[in-house]
Each structure stands twice: as structure tokens, then as C-alpha cells.
Amino acid sequence: MRQRAKLVVGNWKMFGSLAANEALLHGVIAGLKDRLALGQVGVCVPFPYLAQVQEILGGTGLWWGAQDVSAASEGAFTGQVSVSMLREFGTGAVLVGHSERRQYNGESDALVGAKAARAIAGGVRAIACVGETLDERESGRTEAVVLRQVDAILDALALDQLVHLVLAYEPVWAIGTGRTAGPEEAQAVHAAVRRRVLERAPKAGGAMTILYGGSVKPGNAAELFSMPDIDGGLVGGASLVAQDFIAIAAALPVAVG
Ligand code: PGA
């Protein structure tokens, strides 16, 4: 079986400036040095900074991604960005279906699936985000909601595309709140997601990388990453602080599962 990739991915969201990015990236490169050669660490940046990160990160082993992509390949879609444009800047991955896009941009499960499919068909790995709101968790619907979101992503992809898919479980109530899902709490959802992928794609399920996101910090990363179905983290706030991002990446087990 293909080995499961372990990853730590930064999500800068709508933060940054040319000067701040430069300092942050040089700090991360210096702090992680040889570990970067493993290809386990990446940063997903706002579109206008792709050229800058390509210039700074090219050849370092630290890869870069975007935070969204159009479901269309090209056309009259003002304000959207296509996967072929991302490719021109060496973009290795793209987030799709982040809860902030589902919430503020009204992205449906079907649209998220279509974006994942377009990214992968265009040669860019898709990191597809799923997760329940606080209300959904408190009413006992966590698994139903998360598996519905996972199903929509799997529905959109052919089996042979799944090797280019990473899933990220991010409980909405844990994002940017300082409130993390406990390791066991997160593991339970990760295990349910993996079971679903295994049912639908027996060959891909065991090898699928499933990241946890939501207030991952240096103090909780190692414990989260030690869980059997948590294959690393999608890191928002802490990815903007070089020392914190370095510590989180260093918490990733080097051995693959
Ligand atoms: P956070 O964000 O680490 O700031 O909670 C995670 C995310 O939204 O990907």
C-alpha cells in the first residue's frame, strides 16, 4: 500500500504583506532546514503573493498553495482564478471548501466537489476541508454533516484521482477560537472519515492523508499528530508566527504510517 503522507500546511487566510511574508518565510526556511526536503510542509497564501512565494521558496522543499480555485477552466468569471493560472506559479496544492468560504461565499457541497475535481484534473493537489458547526455538534449531527461533505467530494472524483486528494477535518467551532477538539474527539471523527473513504475506495482509504485543523498550536500539535488517523495539521493563526509554525511542523512524525 502507498504510504500515507504526513503534512503540516499553513493557511495564511487574508493576512500578509510583501515585507511580512518575506520575513516569515525566511524564518520558516531557516528554522526547518533539512526537514523541508521531505516535502511535508507547505503554505497556502493569498493569490497576489503566489509570485513572491514562488521566488522565495523555489528549490527550498517548502511548497506553496492557494486558498481557492474556480470550478471552471476559463471564461467570463470575473474575480475567479483558474487552476492553469495557479500552475503557472508552481502552485502545488489548493484549499477547497474551507468553512470560511462555505460560510461567507455560500459554497455548497457540490461546488466544493467540483472545485476539487477541477484542481486535480488541472494537476494541482486538492486539500478539501470539512467540518461541523457548534450547533451541529451540540445537536449530535457531527458525523452526519462531516460524512455528507466527504461524500460530495468523493462523488465528484474518479477513483484514480483520489491519490491527489487530501482531506482536512476542521470543526468550525475550533477555528480561530483557541478551542481545539481534544485529540480523542478529533480522532473519532478522523476514523469515521477514513471508514467512509475505505468503504467507497478501498485502495485509497488507508493511504488518504487526513489533516486536523482548528487552533493547532505548538502546545497541542504533537498530541494531535500522534493519533492514528490524524496525519498532520492545517494551521491558520499559528502559521503566521515563524517560531510557532516551525514548532508545529517539527511535531510531525518523520516516519510515515
Ligand atoms: P486556526 O485556523 O488554526 O487559526 O484555528 C485553521 C484554519 O482555518 O485552517
Image: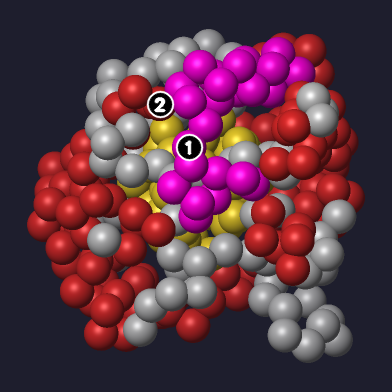
Q: Nearer the viewer, residue 256 or 227?
A: 227
Q: Nearer the viewer, residue 134 or 54?
A: 134
Q: Residue at x 36, y 71 (%)?
A: 54
Name the amino acid, label 1: Thr
The residue that label 2 is drawn on is 224
Compared to residue 228, the image places residue 15 above or below, namely below
Decide: marks 1, 2 in contact (CB < 8 A)? yes
Q: Pick the quarter of the image with the C terminus.
A: top left
Dot 2, how many residues are within 10 Å of its Cα: few (below 14), some (14-19), or many (20+)?
many
Q: Main secondary structure of the magenta part?
A: helix
Tell me where residue 1 appears, x and y as whole percent. Answer: 53, 11
Q: Residue at x 27, y 41 (%)?
A: 218
Report the number of discs.
2
Q: Is mark 1 within 8 Å of ligand 1?
A: no
The answer to whether one can see residue 140 in this image is yes
Compared to residue 229, the image places residue 132 above or below, namely below
Q: Which region of the structure is painted magenta?
A: 172-198
Q: Residue at x 64, y 22 (%)?
A: 189
The answer to whether residue 23 is left or right of residue 43 is left
Tell me where residue 104 appears, x and y as whole percent. Answer: 74, 68
Dot 1, how many residues are within 10 Å of its Cα: few (below 14), some (14-19), or many (20+)?
many
Looking at the rendered structure, the secondary structure element under dot 2 is helix
Looking at the rendered structure, the secondary structure element under dot 1 is loop
Q: Residue at x 70, y 63 (%)?
A: 101
The answer to whether residue 128 is left or right of residue 209 is right
**Residue 158 location, quadrant:** top right
Compared to residue 123, the image places residue 249 above or below, namely above
Name the amino acid, label 2: Leu
The residue that label 1 is drawn on is 180
**Residue 216 location, quadrant:** top left
